[in-house]
């Protein structure tokens, strides 16, 4: 029975997965390095690469127990974008397995994995080869990918061809949340901590900027938002900050969420999209999920949401993308090049 083995090591999470198109996910294994990098306030590339060399073989021992008695069709591996050292470890690991097991390596773009992860819950409702037939009525699709390193809107055609419509010109939304949390004295990663404090705050207490508000400006920017927070904090003493923290978090988070929702709503009328999607690490943010669901409901569109286990870096989405993109009539990128990404093309 056909089985895809997947390797993901683009940043600081070591991950493996086994996926059967007929049965679904047979197993997913992740080792997260968050605790290791926390004292540094962010990911240290050299430490991340070293940990991948330690943990990928350990995760493989668990995966081999599930793989016993099955035949592999391919080994899918993330080839970029990401940290060069981390990617190199994962690619070398996949190539070694390929030589050992006699199966081909399939390169997968990390962002395409995230983009397609929004469809995994829909696939899991009825696993099997009929997935594309079930999905096609919901294409073309408008996807919102929001993570620590990327913020972009893309279209996905019935032929599974990607066009980037809008992307950040500087910082990503997730990066803005994490760095905003750092300015507020919170630990890394700070995005979830901002969300927790914001739960009791007033999102209209402070006026933070929303960049590129015009619908003709198909791009995002969050660097000015961080600067605005820094200047506001410089005018506060510790006691004032402690009292204002929930409101600051709620207002800062609202600026991020409203910026991406507004741009999504501006793009929607430009084509006859039949569905919306949300993926990436920031897709777990509850206000963002709620706001996008409201936009989908208002627009009469199906909303595809990546499951929590597939929002962060994971090998499950890489396996799923490898299988799904193999069905593209035009074929996918087949080069082990960490710099490749789908083309940024004009909308019209």
Image (spheres, helix red, strand yellow):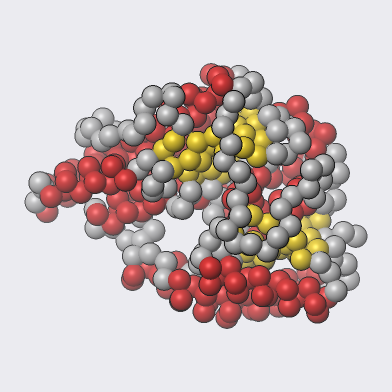
Viewed as shown, does residue 180 lie left or right of 130? left
Q: Residue at x 84, y 66 (%)?
A: 72
Specify the quadrant of the image occupied by residue 127: top right
Q: Residue at x 58, y 68 (%)?
A: 87
Viewed as shown, does residue 158 lie left or right of 50? right
Residue 146: x and y in percent read 49, 44
Viewed as shown, does residue 149 lie left or right of 53? left
Viewed as shown, does residue 277 lie left or right of 83? right
Q: Residue at x 37, y 68 (%)?
A: 38
Q: Which quadrant, please, contains the C terminus?
A: top right
**Considering only vertical position in the picture, is 175 above or below 252?**
below
Q: Nearer the viewer, residue 249 or 176?
A: 176
Q: Is any part of residue 49 visible from this angle? A: yes
Residue 287: x and y in percent read 43, 36
Residue 273: x and y in percent read 63, 25
Q: Is any part of residue 143 visible from this angle? A: no
Q: Residue at x 66, y 45 (%)?
A: 116
**Considering only vertical position in the picture, is 264 above or below 32?**
above
Q: Nearer the viewer, residue 91 or 4?
A: 91
Specify the quadrant of the image occupied by residue 56: bottom right
Give the number of callouts: 0
Residue 307: x and y in percent read 60, 46
């Amino acid at each position: 029975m056909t089985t895809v083995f997947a390797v993901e090591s683009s940043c600081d999470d070591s991950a493996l997965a086994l996926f059967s198109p007929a049965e679904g996910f047979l197993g997913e294994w992740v080792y997260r390095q968050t605790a290791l990098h926390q004292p540094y306030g962010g990911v240290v590339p050299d430490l991340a690469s070293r940990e991948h060399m330690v943990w990928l073989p350990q995760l493989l021992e668990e995966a081999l127990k599930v793989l016993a008695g099955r035949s592999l069709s391919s080994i899918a591996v993330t080839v970029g974008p990401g940290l060069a050292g981390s990617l190199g470890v994962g690619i070398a690991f996949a190539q070694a397995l390929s030589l050992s097991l006699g199966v081909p390596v399939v390169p997968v773009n990390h962002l395409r994995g995230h983009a397609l992860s929004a469809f995994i819950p829909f696939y899991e409702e009825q696993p099997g080869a009929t997935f594309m037939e079930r999905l096609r009525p919901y294409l073309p699709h408008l996807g919102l990918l929001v993570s620590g390193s990327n913020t972009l809107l893309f279209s996905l055609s019935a032929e599974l061809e990607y066009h980037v419509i809008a992307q950040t010109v500087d910082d990503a939304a997730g990066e803005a949340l994490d760095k905003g949390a750092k300015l507020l004295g919170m630990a890394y990663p700070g995005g979830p901590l901002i969300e927790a404090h914001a739960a009791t705050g007033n999102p209209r207490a402070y006026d933070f900027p929303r960049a590129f508000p015009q619908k003709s400006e198909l791009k995002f920017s969050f660097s000015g938002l961080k600067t605005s927070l820094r200047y506001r904090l410089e005018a506060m003493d510790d006691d004032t900050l402690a009292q204002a923290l929930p409101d600051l978090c709620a207002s800062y988070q609202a600026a991020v969420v409203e910026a991406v929702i507004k741009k999504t709503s501006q793009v929607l009328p430009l084509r006859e999209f039949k569905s919306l999607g949300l993926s990436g690490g920031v897709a777990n943010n509850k206000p963002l999920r709620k706001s996008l669901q409201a936009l989908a409901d208002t627009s009469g569109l199906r909303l595809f949401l990546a499951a929590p286990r597939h929002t962060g870096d994971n090998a499950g989405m890489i396996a799923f993308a490898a299988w799904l993109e193999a069905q593209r009539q035009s074929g996918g990128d087949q080069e082990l090049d960490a710099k490749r990404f789908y083309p940024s093309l004009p909308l019209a």
